[in-house]
Amino acid sequence: MYTYPGNIHIHSAYSDGSGSFEEIAADAAAAGLSYVIIADHETLAGLPEEGMNHGVAVLVGNELNRKNNHYLVLNLDKYFPGNEEDPQELIDRVARSGGLGFLAHPFEKGSPYIEKGKAQPWVVWPVFRFHGMEIWNYTSHWRGFHPSPFKTLYHFFFDRKGAMSGPPPELLALWDCYNNSGHRVVGIGSSDAHAFPYKLGPFSIVIFPYRYLFKTINTYIVLETDLSSEFVTARSQILGALQAGRCYSCFDSLHSGKEFRFYAGSQDDPVMMGDTASYVKGLQLNIAVPSERSITRLVRNGRVINEFRKKIIVLDPPGPGVYRVEVLYRRRFHHPRPWIYSNPIFLQPPLQ
Ligand SMILES: [Zn+2]
Ligand SMILES: [Zn+2]
């Protein structure tokens, strides 16, 4: 089993980001990423630049809808417009065209003092048949986390890692609700990187440069073979893993998530995240956590059923269910911080 970190939902100079593809790929390589997905607003202008760049697979998607209901769309080779009023129509149109769609920052909250509380959450519910959703978006999280400028400045200068209080609990609850009721939804983490320059008198500063953001919330894909160095193959491996739910989100600023594993059965013939298998007695769940400084929670059907403080965990699940893993990282002198969120493994009742 091989894991590869990537950063999803990046804006380049083709829309409202500041970087060229060349700069983004160089920063991704410096951050140790294997892939990036650039998703500019309502354009596929970057598509001719898809390919391997600085050893990083650079994929192009786009982000549809401007006002609310932002929809991240991958695997389309031609642009088509969004649908602000009827996002379900957009979701179905993307799916029919072979695209992979993810709800972007569905529960985004504004901050009262940033751009007058501007936020772009999903406002049309319920929606169905989308492929997945962002459970954790770094830029969006900063925007909604801080009720006061003082708190923002404190976290920015003294405890940036502490600002990431994890995916919104109500979003995790919604995600579980979809998965527990048979509507499969793949969870991904993203940066929503723009690398905006801000003017401060004669100076122009970028508060969150790409290189910094590429070490924050990443989505690791899990493959059974090496990730190819040839672009067309790598692209299908990456999209295949995101489609299957063979991926997990990690706040890499705390500690690299590369060594994380979660599967059922044996390593030679594993039931991977995103997979479905029949529950049988003796089918064990295996979790490997990259650091001792961790608290690992096993979630069954949306409820935490076990908690562990060790690196290697093997257990017999108590029965059929939708199982996923959350890991907190125990920082010295700080509260444990949200770190890794797996996609679920679906263990169905055995056929009678
Ligand atoms: Zn957006
Ligand atoms: Zn965006």
Image (cartoon, rainbow, N blue to C red):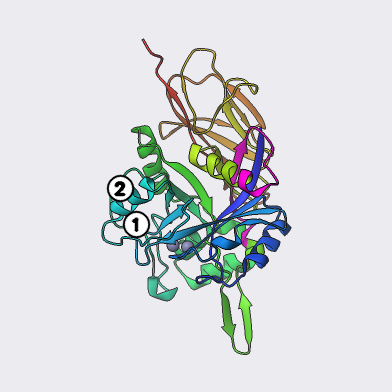
The residue under label 2 is which amino acid type? Answer: Val
* x then y, percent, for residue 347: 45, 23
Q: Are marks 1 and 2 in contact (CB under 8 Å)?
A: yes
Say which amino acid is labelled 1: Trp
Residue 72 found in image quarter: bottom left
Segment colored magenta: 213-233
Q: How many marks?
A: 2
- Residue at the outermost bottom position: 202
Q: Residue at x 37, y 33 (%)?
A: 180
Give coordinates of residue 101: x percent, y percent.
Answer: 42, 49
Q: Nearer the viewer, residue 252 or 225?
A: 225
Tag shown at residue 146: none
**Residue at 65% across, 21% down:** 268
Residue under label 1, please give it: 122
Q: Residue at x 26, y 61 (%)?
A: 85
Label 2 element class: loop
Q: Is residue 18 left or right of residue 118?
A: right
How far apart marks 1 and 2 lie (CA) works out to 10 Å
Can residue 341 be spotted in the picture?
A: no
Q: Residues within 10 Å of mark 2 (few under 14, many from 20)?
A: few
* Residue 333: in magenta span: no
Q: In the rendered view, tell whether residue 207 sits above or below residue 273.
A: below
Label 2 sits on residue = 127
The image quadrant where one finds the C terminus is top left
